[in-house]
Image (cartoon, helix red, strand yellow):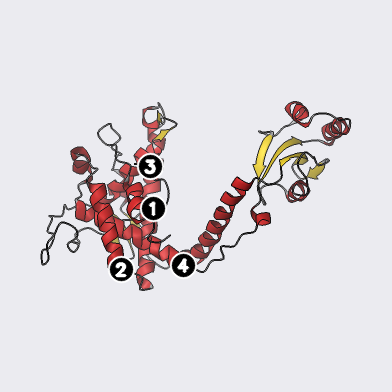
């Protein structure tokens, strides 16, 4: 299963039983004893329990606890800061989901029967991946997992409803990404030396290795990533040509154009631009609503919870399983 590092997270208050899903006959109901758990968060009257929070904590710690094959939990001096990061990420996501669910309900947005059925399939699939040790730590059953996924889906449905009318047209020029080399120097004397050397036929790459004060020589950039005067001159270049000395508040720039239109990265940037528009449209509504509702973190309960990072606790597929079964619902 691929690791899912994207999207918003979701959960809801304990003690709620769901209607029968797959595996029940007509007229049957699903009765699974609920495990009592302390609350860790309450937003606008809805709460998350410690048990529910553990689902996100455990998945996040396994998703973000390994980088390039290195287990960060085993790195000396990393454990405390990593645990703090994971716990902060978890509580932030839980707060946002409860706030989004509250906003969805205020707008009478709810999941359809078909959507609930797809969510139930995802819950069953994820639950079956959990080991006995993980289930013992999480203190949840399949019904609880389904509820978590329903909240996750409702937040996505809200997001789509608030961004459905966003303009998705992005021109090549707006999204254009250029491959280039740069020489950045801090003083006019050095800039004059570089300018003279280039004028006399000096190789840009060779000069960059001697003069460039920036971290990198080879760069890829789009609009809004370089000083305005540098961007204007750079985007006017053809392949194989270079700018002269460009004075900015931070120094002097020379740009050499390797590829004025990187098609693959430009197409990817179009998606990013649309996502940025959607995020802005969503944020305007969400931020205003979020300021009007009450939020409370039960600090003692949350701070006393320790991450369970061990070889017996490896689940990291909560989000990728959802994506597999429900990714197309609100795309």
Left/right of residue 154 with respect to residue 168 in the rendered view? left
Mark 3 touches mark 1? (CB < 8 Å):
no
Identify the residue under disc 2: 112
Choose between 283 and 327: the one closer to the eye: 327
Q: CA distance from mark 3 to mark 1?
A: 18 Å
Identify the residue under disc 3: 3
Q: Quadrant of residue 72?
A: top left
What x and y, as percent, mark residue 184? 75, 36
Q: Earlier in the sequence, mark 3 or mark 4?
A: 3
- Compared to residue 128, the image places residue 111 above or below, namely below
What x and y, as percent, mark residue 272? 55, 53
Q: Earlier in the sequence, mark 2 or mark 3?
A: 3
Q: CA distance from mark 2 to mark 4?
A: 18 Å
What x and y, as percent, mark residue 165? 51, 69
Identify the residue under disc 1: 93
Identify the residue under disc 4: 162
For residue 48, say whether it is visible.
no
């Amino acid at each position: 299963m691929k690791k899912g590092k994207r999207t918003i997270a979701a959960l809801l208050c304990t003690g709620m039983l769901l209607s029968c899903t797959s595996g029940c006959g007509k007229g049957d109901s699903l009765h699974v004893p609920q495990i009592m758990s302390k609350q860790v968060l309450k937003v606008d009257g809805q709460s998350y329990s410690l048990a529910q929070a553990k689902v996100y904590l455990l998945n996040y710690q396994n998703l973000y606890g390994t980088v390039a094959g290195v287990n960060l939990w085993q790195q000396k001096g990393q454990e405390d800061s990593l645990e703090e990061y994971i716990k902060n990420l978890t509580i932030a996501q839980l707060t946002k989901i409860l706030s989004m669910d509250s906003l969805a309900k205020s707008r009478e947005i709810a999941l359809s029967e078909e959507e609930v059925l797809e969510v139930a399939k995802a819950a069953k699939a994820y639950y079956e991946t959990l080991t006995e040790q993980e289930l013992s730590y999480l203190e949840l059953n399949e019904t609880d997992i389904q509820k978590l996924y329903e909240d996750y889906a409702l937040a996505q449905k809200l997001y789509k409803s608030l961004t459905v009318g966003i303009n998705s047209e992005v021109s090549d020029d707006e999204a254009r990404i250029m491959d280039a080399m740069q020489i950045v120097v801090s003083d006019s004397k050095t800039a004059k030396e570089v300018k003279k050397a280039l004028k006399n036929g000096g190789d840009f790459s060779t000069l960059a290795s001697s003069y460039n004060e920036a971290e990198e020589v080879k760069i890829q950039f789009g609009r809004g990533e370089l000083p305005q005067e540098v961007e204007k001159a750079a985007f006017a270049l053809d392949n194989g040509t270079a700018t002269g000395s460009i004075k900015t508040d931070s120094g002097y720039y020379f740009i050499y154009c390797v590829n004025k239109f990187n098609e693959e990265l430009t197409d990817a940037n179009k998606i990013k631009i649309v996502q940025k528009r959607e995020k802005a449209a969503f944020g305007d509504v969400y931020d205003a609503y979020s300021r009007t509702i009450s939020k409370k973190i039960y600090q003692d309960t949350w701070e006393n919870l320790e991450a369970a990072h061990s070889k017996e606790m490896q689940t990291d597929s909560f989000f990728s399983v959802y994506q597999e079964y429900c990714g197309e619902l609100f795309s």
